[in-house]
Image (cartoon, rainbow, N blue to C red):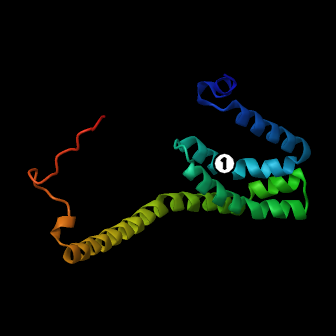
Amino acid sequence: MAVQNATQGGRDWSKVLGMGTVMVLLAIFSLPTLIVLLPGMLPTGVAKVCDRTDQRYATFCVGGLNLCGVFPYLLKLWTDDHSINAAANIISDIFSILVMYSAAGFGWMMFMAIPPVVSAFLTVLAQRRVTFLRSLQEDIVTEWGPEVSMIDDADSKPAPVANKRR
């Protein structure tokens, strides 16, 4: 019953509460980091809203590469001057925003391009396996005779075994 109440309406409120708590703590203790993270990770939020699958592959792909684009600027903020003015300078620099969003765009491109490549590769592997198994089947039929292969005639099928009771 508690699980049903937690996910009522299709939303897991424990996750929402956890993210809200993290955001409030980040705003209290590290506001400049939050100032860079919110606009920098915006494409990840869009990917999360757009991704309706259970596995959330688009969110992970876009989010991971988006974080890779934001991380150098976070390191610069943490190592040089951790102030609101430095965070505002990073966010107002068009090149830094371009790097962050381009990394997320590359994540979208990977999400679109990699699954068909993997699917084609797995199809080729499956076809090779089928040809190998067919050649193995032919070898067995030549060695043991056609009796070991599947028989298509309905007349030659053995009769079902009757259930014997004593």
Give the camera-side residue of 63 and 93: 63
**In this view, which residue lies farthest toward the front?**
166
User: Above or below — where is 17 with respect to 31?
Assistant: above
* Residue at image location 61% in from the left, 61% down from the top: 102
Q: Position of residue 124 (x, y in %)?
A: 36, 70
Give the camera-side residue of 104 and 19: 19
Horizontal side, residue 31 vs residue 111: left or right: right
User: Above or below — where is 45 with respect to 90?
Assistant: above
Horizontal side, residue 134 vs residue 95: left or right: left
Name which quarter of the figure residue 101 lies in: bottom right
* Quadrant placement of the C terminus: top left
Q: Position of residue 57 (x, y in %)?
A: 56, 52
* Residue at image location 73% in from the left, 33% down from the top: 14
User: Above or below — where is 77 with respect to 19?
Assistant: below
Q: Badge 1: how crowded within 10 Å, few (<14), some, or many (20+)?
A: some
Give the camera-side residue of 144 and 118: 144
Horizontal side, residue 83 vs residue 18: left or right: right
Q: Position of residue 157 (x, y in %)?
A: 15, 52
Q: Position of residue 68 (x, y in %)?
A: 69, 62
**Badge count:** 1
Instruction: Quickly name the residue at label 1.
Output: 42
User: Above or below — where is 39 with respect to 124?
Assistant: above
Question: Callout 1: helix, strand or loop?
Answer: helix
* Residue at image location 76% in from the left, 33% down from the top: 17
* Quadrant placement of the N terminus: top right
Give the camera-side residue of 82 and 147: 147
* Residue at image location 81% in from the left, 57% down from the top: 89
* Badge 1 amino acid: Leu
Horizontal side, residue 90 vs residue 136: left or right: right
